[in-house]
Image (spheres, rainbow, N blue to C red):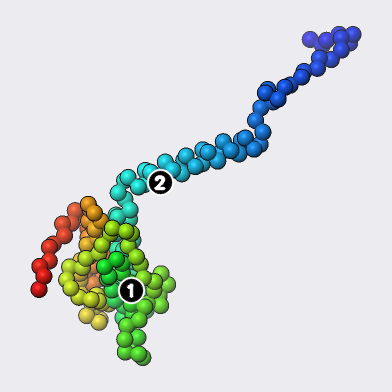
Amino acid sequence: MIPPASQPPRIVVVTRSEAGMTLIEVLVVLAIIAVAAGLSVLAIGAGSGTSGRAEAARLASRLQLAADRSMIEDTRLAFAPAKDGYSFIEWDARQGSWRPSRIDGLGERVRLPAGMTITPDDARPLFPLDANAGGLGFTLTLADRSRHWAIAFDGITARLQPGHTPATRSAP
């Protein structure tokens, strides 16, 4: 219904408490929600124990990549384990020695997360990956404080083995 023309238009006065939220207040609330969501995601990931398995899967993938590249590019590559990490090295025929690999993604030394160790199934310092240069199969055990994962390399394929119990090695 249309108000009669004799009545003046109604003026509504809004006080500060009824005006709603400012843009700054909305941004602060969104920032709080984002921080809370980030913390909850980190807490879920830290308690699930998947970081060790992810590291083992990453190692198996890198071994497979190195073996494939060695075969495709006809390059002598080797896996060089260390107490706290590993690296891939390649044979330099000109120098007659091993050097860090120049293949993308394999040249840098990988450090394992704190508390994680890598143990080969034998005491060789290097594990050749190409079958032409005497590459033999081997098994690596990646372990943290309470769990372990095995990565088996048969000379061609690297795979993560579920449910592996590491063998104890006696000192010579």
Q: Secondary structure at mark 1?
A: strand
Snapshot quadrant of residue 59:
bottom left
Q: Nearer the viewer, residue 151 or 99?
A: 99
Where does label 2 land, which residue?
42
Point 46% across, 44% down: residue: 38
Earlier residue among tags 2 and 1: 2
Point 22% across, 56% down: residue: 148
Q: CA distance from mark 2 to mark 1?
A: 31 Å
Q: At which x and y percent is residue 166? A: 16, 60
Mark 2 surroundings: few (<14), some (14-19) or many (≥20) residues within 10 A = few
Q: Secondary structure at mark 2?
A: helix
| 50 left or right, relative to 18 | left
Q: Amino acid at mark 2?
A: Leu
Badge 2 vs badge 1, beta-carbon distance below 8 Å:
no
- Residue 164 vs 86, above or below: the answer is above
- Residue 72 vs 59, above or below: the answer is below
Q: Amino acid at mark 1?
A: Phe
Q: At which x and y percent is residue 139? A: 20, 66
Residue 68 in view of the camera = no
Q: Nearer the viewer, residue 45 or 35?
A: 35
Q: At which x and y percent is residue 99? A: 35, 81
| 12 left or right, relative to 83 | right
Point 22% across, 52% down: residue: 146
Callout in the foreground (2, 1): 2
Mark 1 surroundings: few (<14), some (14-19) or many (≥20) residues within 10 A = many
Point 15% across, 57% down: residue: 165
Snapshot quadrant of residue 58:
bottom left
Where does label 1 land, which residue?
88
